[in-house]
């Protein structure tokens, strides 16, 4: 009895099936681009916060009104200079009397209106965070010769404790909310 | 000349396509890994602002999404044009946020719960009023890790 060779399975349609799957996944998925500004909200408490007496020289108050205009420490300011001014305030290189005694004591206070544009709010928040991140990078470069994100955990912790990111947000005012 | 014509008359060997499926499968797996399933159909238009200090959201299963924006054209007849909140795939009010967070929380193993992040996808033109209400609801529900979704700034 002559043994027949088993017939070969035709695999040419396999590519079509795989293509079909590929196209299905291309259509139903989105490429991950989930990035954002990470913040930590303060816990909620029903009692009004204690009125802490802060030395005014340590407080960098930023107000944004419903017209998306900035008031920084009582004076009108612009978004372009916000980051640089914040950096100068926190580090206080010239040891001025009216700026932060020490970066550890500095507090950035942000207050907006219910009518402020979200885009403006996020830009302001981003600039403030960028000021801190740049200061941390500068310190990391001075001490270890590389950027903050490339340091070890312990090194990062030391620098973060010397330049703590404190952005306190007050309850927004309500003058210009859209109806 | 004769040495080249020796093959004349012979059939051209067929190109083997047996490895084609493997190549396509490789592509398929690549796309499956770098993409996420589109989980909710957007009913509000969300065009997030751009920012430079971005953090990447690491674990998808630990993230819940809250969308805030103006309803899209086809929903404007029912919901108007003022900013609305979308939870999952439907419009919602601020009061429904705690339940939404709780429903997500029970799908996460207990040890990972402190890492849960809320991604706020908010349209840039929305005013802070509704965003503040959402933030207050999150704080009351003790969901404090928040990520303001933003596009990378190109400068």
Image (spheres, coloured by chain):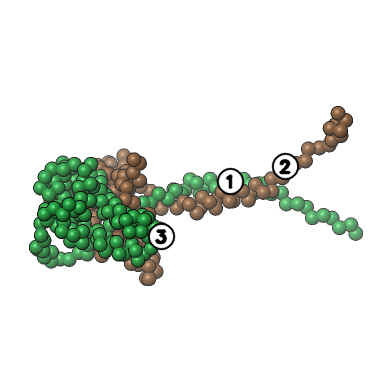
Say yes or no: labels 1 and 3 on the same chain: no
Q: Please name the color used to draw chain B.
A: brown
Q: Chain of mark 1?
A: A
> Callout 3: 10 Å neighbours few (<14), some, many (20+)?
few
Instruction: Give the quadrant of the C terminus of chain A.
Output: top left
- Residue behind mark 1: A19
Viewport quadrant of the N terminus of chain A: bottom right
Left or right: where A81 falls relative to B103: left
Residue hosting label 2: B15
Which of the 4 quarters of the picture holds residue A169? bottom left
Q: Is residue B107 left or right of residue B129?
A: right
Identify which residue is drawn at 89% across, 57% down: A2
Query: Do the CB atoms of the residues marked 1 and 3 lie less than 8 Å apart?
Result: no
For label 1, the crowd category at 10 Å Cα-Cα, with few meaning under 14, some 14 to 19 and many 20 or more, is some
- Badge 2 local density, few (<14 within 10 Å), some, or many (20+)? few
Along the line of sight, which residue is nearer the eye, B136 or B74?
B136
Residue A165 position, x and y percent, is 24, 58
Residue B59, which numbered label? Answer: 3
Q: Look at the image and tell me whether residue A98 can be seen.
A: yes
- How far apart are the two marked residues, 2 and 1, measured between alpha carbons? 19 Å
Residue B48 falls in image quadrant: top left
> Which colour denotes chain A?
green
């Amino acid at each position: 009895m002559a043994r027949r060779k088993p017939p070969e399975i035709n695999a040419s349609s396999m590519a079509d099936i795989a293509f079909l799957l590929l196209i299905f996944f291309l259509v139903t998925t989105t490429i991950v681009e989930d990035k954002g500004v990470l913040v930590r909200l303060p816990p909620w408490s029903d009692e009004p916060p204690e009125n802490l007496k802060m030395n005014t020289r340590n407080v960098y108050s930023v107000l944004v009104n419903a017209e998306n205009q900035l008031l920084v420490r009582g004076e009108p300011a612009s978004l372009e200079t916000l980051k640089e001014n914040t950096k100068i305030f926190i580090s206080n290189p010239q040891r001025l009397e009216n700026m932060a005694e020490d970066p550890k004591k500095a507090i950035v206070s942000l207050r907006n209106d219910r009518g402020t544009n979200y885009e403006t709010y996020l830009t302001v928040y981003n600039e403030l965070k960028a000021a801190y991140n740049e200061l941390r990078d500068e310190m990391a470069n001075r001490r270890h010769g590389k950027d903050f994100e490339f340091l070890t955990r312990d090194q990062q912790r030391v620098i973060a404790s010397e330049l703590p990111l404190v952005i306190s947000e007050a309850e927004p005012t309500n003058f210009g909310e859209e109806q | 000349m004769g040495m080249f014509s020796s093959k004349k008359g012979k059939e051209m060997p067929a190109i083997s396509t047996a490895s084609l499926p493997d190549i396509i499968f490789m592509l398929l797996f690549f796309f499956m890994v770098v993409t996420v399933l589109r989980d909710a159909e957007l009913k509000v238009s969300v065009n997030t602002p751009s920012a430079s200090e971005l953090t990447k959201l690491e674990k998808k299963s630990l993230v819940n999404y809250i969308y805030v924006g103006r309803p899209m054209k086809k929903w404007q007849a029912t919901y108007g044009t003022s900013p609305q909140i979308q939870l999952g795939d439907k419009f919602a009010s601020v009061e429904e946020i705690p339940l939404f967070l709780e429903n997500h929380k029970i799908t996460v193993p207990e040890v990972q719960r402190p890492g849960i992040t809320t991604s706020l996808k908010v349209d840039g033109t929305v005013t802070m009023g509704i965003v503040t209400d959402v933030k207050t609801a999150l704080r009351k529900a003790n969901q404090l890790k928040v990520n303001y979704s933003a596009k990378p700034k190109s400068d």
